[in-house]
Amino acid sequence: MTAIIPLSELRERIDAIDQQILQLINRRAECAIEVARTKMAEGETGSFYRADREAQVLRKIKELNPGPLSDHASVHLFRELMSACLALEKPLEVAFLGPVGTFTQQATFKHFGHAVKGIPVATIPEIFLAVETSHCQFGVVPVENSTEGVIAHTLDRFMTTSLQICGEVEIRVHQNLLGKMDNLAAINEVYSHQQSLAQCRQWLNTYLPGVPCTAVSSNAEAARLASLDHNKAAIAGLMAAELYELNIIEQHIEDESNNTTRFIVIGKQQPASTGLDKTSILVSTGNQAGALHKILGPFAEYGISMAHIESRPSRQGLWEYVFFIDIDGHRDDPDVAKALETLQNNVKMLKILGSYPKAVI
Ligand SMILES: O=C(O)C(=O)C[C@]1(C(=O)O)C=C[C@@H](O)C=C1
């Protein structure tokens, strides 16, 4: 059996290592400041954030991690380190679906780290507008939930915007029943966003039968309302419970244990290829026979995997649909470029919504 090392000695070791880490992370920060000077000298006037480079740094950390720290923990530490380095270069402002305490805010911090300045915005169209008008450099919007399907507001806005998708982030969504009360019997109304109410429908029917459920603009707004009345409860995330000082009456009340929401990052940048990317496109075929075949053919021909396909009414002709499609690969990868070129000739309209690195964390 190995000898037990006295606590005082171990703490001395930790203090010495901390000192070295501190020096090293500051050397890294100095490099980031130099990077900013170079970017400015090269004429960069917009954001200094680089989605492709960040994905590469985080993937490398995963690959090199010798343990015993988990890959997850190591990647999160470096996520925050890069976020702080970028804030030294030039602070980043990101619009998210507010108010504070929403899952979209959680997704924003997960993707950009906590040194980013998150700006809460009331609606999805206003997030697009904040980025289009350069009030914020990026925006984060929900795009689909594994239980409830796509977020139509987000997809529809892509038909008209010139913004690009620059990244994706997934959040395992755990819903909680929150309130000022401490038992279910005291609850006479439940507030939440309509998506969250839908994600907890069975639980609500079982444990709060007959109690009215009211949809409000966000989970955080539901928590705020619940904080004003001892008989009203909210369904929201734990961040909202903390923010509005609510009791957690019941945790993890979502009907699907794998309940996950996918968010996308929108901006004016086009990330470079990293070797592990996705491309999102919007396609319209008009109301013609064999439409789907014309779309899928080029991807099959060039061996491109399709991750997702979703149809929405085009709002132009009766029974005309547009397709939102996610494929594996970057628009600059030769096979993807050839498939997109062939597709362009097969359809009425093709819009590339963006090529971006696959989520790392
Ligand atoms: O490599 C860059 O372009 C940097 O700005 C440095 C750095 C980093 O800290 O590693 C910081 C922010 C960018 O989003 C990507 C990487």
Image (cartoon, rainbow, N blue to C red):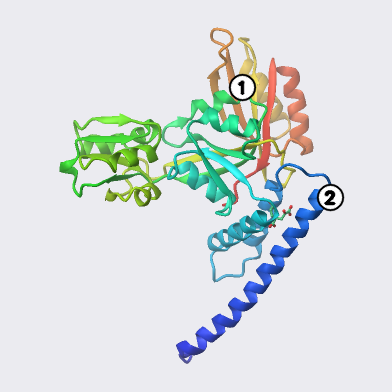
Q: Position of residue 172 (x, y in %)?
A: 45, 46
Judge from the rendering whether residue 331 lies leftward or rightward of residue 244; answer left or right: right
| Disc 1 target residue | 159
Front residue (pair 119, 340) = 119
Q: Quadrant of residue 268?
A: top right
Q: Position of residue 184 (x, y in %)?
A: 19, 44
Residue in the image at 59% along x and 10% along y: 316
Q: Earlier in the sequence, mark 2 or mark 1?
A: 2
Mark 2, secondary structure of its residue: helix
Residue in the image at 28% along x and 50% along y: 248
Front residue (pair 258, 361) = 361
Front residue (pair 225, 295) = 225
Q: Is residue 179 above or below residue 70?
A: above
Q: Residues within 10 Å of mark 1 (few under 14, many from 20)?
A: some
**Disc marking residue 141:** none
**Disc marking residue 41:** 2
Judge from the rendering whether residue 127 lies leftward or rightward of residue 342; answer left or right: left
Q: Position of residue 249 (x, y in %)?
A: 25, 49
Residue in the image at 58% along x and 38% along y: 139
- From the viewer's perspective, is the residue at label 2 or at label 1 nearer? 2
Residue in the image at 60% along x and 79% along y: 17
Please tell me in which quarter of the rendered image ligand 1 is found.
Answer: bottom right
Q: What amino acid type is highlighted by mark number 1? A: Met
Q: What amino acid type is highlighted by mark number 2? A: Ala
